[in-house]
Image (cartoon, rainbow, N blue to C red):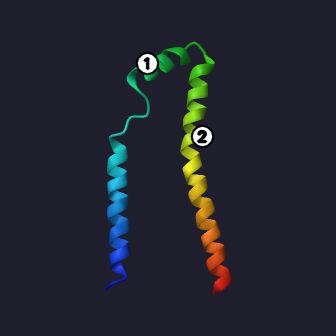
Amino acid sequence: MSTFVPMKKIIILLVLTVTATLTASAQCPMCKASVESNMKNDNAKGKGLNDGIIYLLATPYLAIAAIGGAWYYKRKVKV
């Protein structure tokens, strides 16, 4: 029964994280309007902003993958 307690905490944390991010906005309304109007004119600001968002989005996933990979290989060597 005690093995389900950590899993229950993980599920609760995951649900809270997902619901908290649903209300978050990616950009302020002024920035969004400016980028949308400039994207029609092939301006580089919008493309740069989108690249920055992708960069910021990918960084935590890469860090988690590196930590998970190191943990997996370290655990695999012990067993």
Q: Quadrant of residue 9?
A: bottom left
Q: Quadrant of residue 41?
A: top right
Quarter holding the N terminus is bottom left
Task: Note whether 22 is above or below 45 in the view shown.
Answer: below
Quarter holding the C terminus is bottom right
- Side of 15 relative to 79 (left or right): left
Q: Pick out the residue farthest to the top.
A: 41
Secondary structure beneath label 2: helix
* Residue carrying label 1: 33
Question: What is the three-letter code of the residue carrying label 1?
Answer: Ala
* Residue 54: % across, % down: 57, 39
- Mark 1: few, some, or many residues within 10 Å (few <14, many ≥20)? few
C-alpha separation, residue under disc 1 versus residue under disc 2: 21 Å
* Residue 42: % across, % down: 61, 16
* CB contact under 8 Å: marks 1 and 2: no
- Side of 41 relative to 21 (left or right): right
For image coordinates 56% across by 53% down, the residue present is 61
For image coordinates 37% across by 59% down, the residue present is 14
Q: Pick out the residue farthest to the right.
A: 77
Q: Earlier in the sequence, mark 1 or mark 2?
A: 1
* Residue 57: % across, % down: 54, 43
Task: Note whether 73 is above or below 35 in the view shown.
Answer: below
For image coordinates 65% across by 76% down, the residue present is 74
- Mark 2: few, some, or many residues within 10 Å (few <14, many ≥20)? few
For image coordinates 58% across by 34% down, the residue present is 52
* Residue carrying label 2: 55
Q: Quadrant of residue 67?
A: bottom right
- Side of 11 relative to 35 (left or right): left
The mark found on residue 2 in the picture is: none
Question: What is the three-letter code of the residue carrying label 2?
Answer: Tyr
Secondary structure beneath label 1: helix
